[in-house]
Amino acid sequence: MNNEIPIGSAVRTQAIINRYFVKAKKNLGQNFLVDLDAIKGIVQAAGIQPGDQVIEIGPGIGSLTEQLLLAGAKVFAYEVDESLPEILSNELPAKIDGVRLDDRFKLMMKDILKADFPADFEDFLDVNKPIKVVANLPYYITTPIIFFLNQANLNFTSLTLMMQEEVAERLDAQPNSKAYGPLTIAVQTQMTVKLALNVKSSSFIPRPKVDSSVVVLTPLTEQMDVGDPKYFNWVVKMCFSQRRKTLNNNLKNLVPDPDQRKQLIDSLGVDPRIRPEQLTIKQFIQIAAAISPQKS
Ligand code: SAM
C-alpha cells in the first residue's frame, strides 16, 4: 500500500486492518476514524501550528496522529493496546519535513487515567511551553478523562476532544434544556465549551451506535469561585437528584428545615416551584455557598 495515502482514509485503514489482523477491541472503545475531513477538522479545531506540543489520548492505528504530525505538532501519546506500537512505528511516516519520527512522536503505554504529569513527558516535551490535548476519546471513559485532565497537574491551553454527541450536548448545554445538568455545571465552572463539529457514526470502523461531536474546552481566564469543587459538584448533583421535581423538593435532604429552605430559595429570588434545570450556574454557586459547612 502506498504510504502517501493517509491512514485516516478508509482504504488505508482497511489495508492496515488486513495486514496486522486488527480486531477492534470494544472494551477499549476502539472505533477508528476513517473520515479525513473529520480528522482535519479536529486538527483545525485544535488550531495546530508548526511547533505545537500535543498530548494525544489513544492514537489507535495513527489516523489522527499522522495529521497532527503533518500539521507540524510534536506528539506525546498514551495508549493501552499492546498490539498498536508495532503498527504505529511501521505505518506513521518515518520522516516528516526531514525530521525523524522519533523526534516528533513518542508513545507511552499507559492508561491515561494513571498518567503522571509532567514526569511522563518531561524528557520529550518542554514543560514550560503550552500543551494542547487532542483526542478521539475512548468513549467508555469520556467523563473520567475530562475530570482527570482538569484536576491533573497539566497546564493545558485547550482540550480538543471527540466524544459521543450526547455527552457533547451535555457539556455545551444552557439552562432550561434537557441536556443541562451536573456535568454541564461541573465543566462550565472550569472551562469554556465550544462545539466544533459533528461526525456521523459512518465515519468510523467499526461503526459505533451513536454519532459523535468534537468539543474544544479552554480553561476560563477568570475562575468561578465555587469553594471546594468536590462539595460544589455534590450539592449540584443533590439538587438534580429528582430532575422532574421542584428545587424545594430536591433541597429537602440538604436543608431539612422548611423555614431555612424557604429563606435560601427566597435569597435566590426564584419561585420555590422552579425545577433544578432552570437555575443558572451562579444560583448553584449561591446555594452551595449558603449551605457549605466551611462558610464563615
Ligand atoms: N485515535 C484513533 C482514531 O481516531 O482512529 C483511535 C481512537 S479510539 C476511539 C480510542 C483509542 O483509545 C484506542 O486506540 C484505545 O486502545 C485507546 N484507549 C482505550 N482506553 C485507553 C486508556 N485508558 N488510556 C489510553 N488509551 C486508551
Image (cartoon, rainbow, N blue to C red):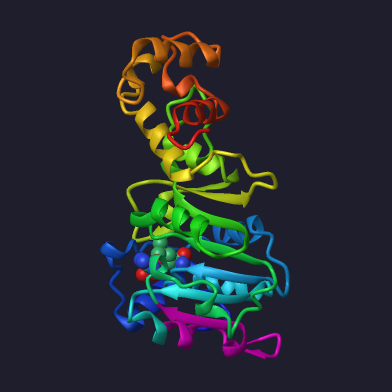
Q: Is residue 258 left or right of residue 149?
A: left
- Locate ligand 1 by image quadrant: bottom left
| Residue for point 32% across, 28% down | 241
Q: Residue furthest front?
A: 296
Quarter of the image for residue 277 reads top left
| Residue for point 45% across, 58% down | 148
Q: Is residue 120 above or below residue 136?
A: below
Q: Is residue 258 magenta?
A: no
Quarter of the image for residue 204 reads bottom left
Q: Position of residue 211 (x, y in %)?
A: 42, 46
Q: Is residue 97 magenta?
A: yes
Closest to the observer, 55 or 94: 55
Quarter of the image for residue 111 reads bottom left
Closest to the observer, 93 or 238: 238
| Residue for point 48% across, 81% down | 107
Q: Position of residue 196 (x, y in %)?
A: 60, 47
Q: Position of residue 280 (x, y in %)?
A: 55, 25
Q: Which residues are magenta?
A: 87-109
Q: Is residue 134 above or below residue 239?
A: below
| Residue for point 54% across, 65% down | 153
Q: Is residue 62 above or below residue 296?
A: below
Q: Is residue 86 left or right of residue 127?
A: left
